[in-house]
Image (spheres, rainbow, N blue to C red):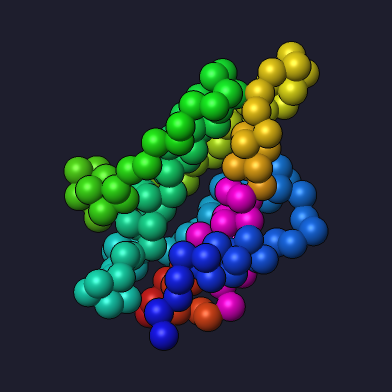
Amino acid sequence: MKETPQDYTKRILGNVEGQNPLKILAGTSKKLDRLIKGVPASKLRKRPAPEKWSVAEILAHLADVEIAVGWRLRQILGAPGTPIQAYDQDSWAAAGHYAKRDPRKCVEQIRVVRAGTVEAPRHACRAGRGDHRAHRSYDRRARHQPYETGRADRGGEEEIRVES
């Protein structure tokens, strides 16, 4: 039976139950650096199956997601009640040439953009601004992060790993 969106959400949110979401988010780029350290780009670009993304494509996706999440959170903080805009990840993958992007530069982009994104709600809270959705969004993003980095995926099928 195919996993429902509700089942997926429940599984992902359970990955880091009881952990600090901001600490998870802040540590992601270091985790990604460790995962790809010393791995040749050719291995990072190899797809485990024709319909599965390579590690390089996943990292490019995460780099773009970081921009999207940062924008969404700033919209929520700056204009509470703003609808959250969706996007088509497959269209972004095609338009962004994920298969050709440099995996290490993607991790660097994640690090730099994430640093600003993690600080955004802290500044908003100090200023007495923001929306509860921003904090909930960070919590959900942090809980999804281990899945994306392959750390907590219980099924193992979609772990970020380098195939031999």
- What residue is drawn where x is 41% and y is 53%? 59
Work out whether residue 93 can be spotted: no
The quarter of the picture where the C terminus appears is bottom left
Residue 15's place in the image compared with 74, above or below, is below
Q: Nearer the viewer, residue 77 or 121?
A: 77
Quarter of the view holding residue 96:
top left
Q: Residue furthest bottom?
A: 1
Instruction: Count numbered badges in the picture.
Output: 0
What's the magenta region?
140-154
Task: Give residue 153's position: percent from left, percent from top.
Answer: 56, 72
Q: Is residue 122 left or right of residue 52?
A: right
Q: Is residue 70 left or right of residue 51?
A: right
- What residue is drawn where x is 62% and y is 36%? 133
Magenta stretch contains residue 141: yes
The quarter of the picture where the N terminus appears is bottom left
- What residue is drawn where x is 54% and y is 27%? 81
Residue 151's place in the image compared with 68, above or below, is below
- What residue is drawn where x is 66% and y is 23%? 130
Q: Residue furthest top?
A: 127
Task: Give residue 38's position: percent from left, percent from top.
Answer: 47, 61
Task: Give residue 92's position: percent from left, percent from top.
Answer: 27, 45
Task: Give residue 2's position: percent from left, percent from top.
Answer: 40, 79
Q: Nearer the viewer, residue 101 or 119?
A: 119
Magenta stretch contains residue 156: no
Q: Look at the magenta stretch and give its main secondary structure.
A: helix
Work out whether residue 54 can be spotted: yes
Q: Nearer the viewer, residue 99 or 62?
A: 62
